[in-house]
Image: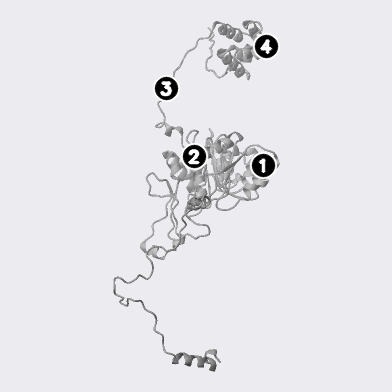
Amino acid sequence: MRRSLAPSQLHKRRLDCNQPLKRKKVLEDEDSDSQDRTPLSAINNTLPSARRTSSHEAFIRKILAKPFKIPIANYVSQGHRGLGVRRSGVRQPLHDPDEPDALVLYRPKELSAHEKMTVNTEKLEVAVVVDPMLSAVLRPHQREGVKFMYECVTGKRIDDNYGCIMADEMGLGKTLQCITLMWTLLRQSSDCRPTIEKTVIVAPSSLVKNWYNEINKWLKGKLNALAIDSGTKTEIDSKLKGFMSTFGRRPINPVLIISYETFRLHAHVLHQGEVGLVLCDEGHRLKNCENQTYQALMGLKAKRRVLLSGTPIQNDLLEYFSLLHFVNAGILGTAQEFRKKYERVILRSRDADASDKDHELGKERLDELISIVSRCIIRRTNDILSKYLPVKIEHVVCCPLTTVQKDMYHAFITSSAVKKQLSDGDGRLGNTALAAITSMKKLCNHPDLLWEKVKAHEPGYADLEKFFPPGHDPRHVLTAVFASCRVCIVRVKS
């Protein structure tokens, strides 16, 4: 039984109904429409306010009034997304592709009105735009090079191949182009997320610091690079393990700069993880596909590979194959297949006794080879810099030799030892002729450059000691004397 239906409760309810209703107290002025009616609440704030504030309370209020700032030096936010908050609305590119002089590396196709109604907005592709900080300093040929490399490493030029060779001549800005590519891949993609997480730059030991300085110069401290050029084996292994074990959207050191020798010695550590991009400076060092450095780099788990070299072809086509095989493995087959299909046929067509059929087949294979490699290699010469450089003016200054230099020069070339060096008896130049010519150039520059050989009484130099003053010591006379000089006397036989 419900308690409200109990007899005791019903009895109380009957008593309440029999009692007369009490009239509520009303205001003295019952005219609700009167303008003098008292308001329901006071207009002014009736809450008590603190008349005096202590210095501590003022300090706390000042701190709380400041906006929140991330306590990381040189931190630059790439968006306004909160921690753990999903992005809402339509996807947007990181930089505006419609800005003047914007370098757009990828632009998604335009959707029709029907496609816009049916497509999932969370999967829409966005444009990939180079950071305006870098695109503002890129020259036209550099902008073209960055776009070419981006299309290669994203697989848009050759299916299932993500490598290329940057073969521009020295002075065209290969380093800046690669830094631009690396920064773009680390920050954005058409899917609104970074394309890669980490990059490894392999360079000669003399260029490790140069790469580190160039990254800080162009990116202005926005990217932390780890440069390893010295240290014990334990220290280097520890740094490399820390680099390879770092994952996430924003690792502390997303770029590793290391020399070829250090990479080869510590390859077992670098092979433990995956790397998004590898850049090899002075890549012609990888012309031999059988050496240890080449094999160590091939073992690195990196799908995207970029090789920098101003001289990709040096001796033969097999070296060229090694470079192409490194960036795009299998694009030309194996080394045996390349040698059989291309190298032997092309070299046979260059022989003097080659037939017309050999010439025709060699030209056909050469054109086929060029059509394949042109999709993953870009090369420009210094001629494109002519419009950026001032007019070159050369001044030729003739400096006659002193009397002492002339006498020493004549005594040197008439000595029996030098005559023997310059000729082997049948009128031809001997193998040591270049050494004698170099000594003649040094003598024309300054006699002190030959002092060590004169003092040691080497053949051909013993007769020159009489031309030096007694007690002569060039270390106390000259601070710097260079042997690079184009002045030389040519002795013509009458």
Residue 23 is left or right of residue 298, and the answer is left
Is tag 2's residue or tag 4's residue first in the polypeptide sequence? 2
Evaluate if marks 3 and 1 touch, with contact meaning CB atoms under 8 Å apart. Answer: no
Q: Which mark is residue 218?
A: 2
The three-letter amino acid code for the residue at tag 3 is Ile
Residue 352, percent across and down?
53, 32
Spatial separation of the CA atoms under disc 3 and disc 2: 32 Å
Residue 159, percent across and down?
51, 52
Is tag 3's residue or tag 4's residue first in the polypeptide sequence? 3
Spatial separation of the CA atoms under disc 2 and disc 1: 27 Å
Q: Which mark is residue 455?
A: 4
Secondary structure beneath label 3:
loop
Q: Residue at x 38, y 66 (%)?
A: 42
Is tag 1's residue or tag 4's residue first in the polypeptide sequence? 1
The three-letter amino acid code for the residue at tag 2 is Trp
Q: Which residue does the numbered mark 3 point to in the structure image?
A: 393
Q: Residues within 10 Å of mark 1 (few under 14, many from 20)?
A: some
Mark 1 vs mark 4, foreground winner is: 1
Secondary structure beneath label 1:
helix
Mark 2 vs mark 4, foreground winner is: 2
Spatial separation of the CA atoms under disc 3 and disc 4: 42 Å
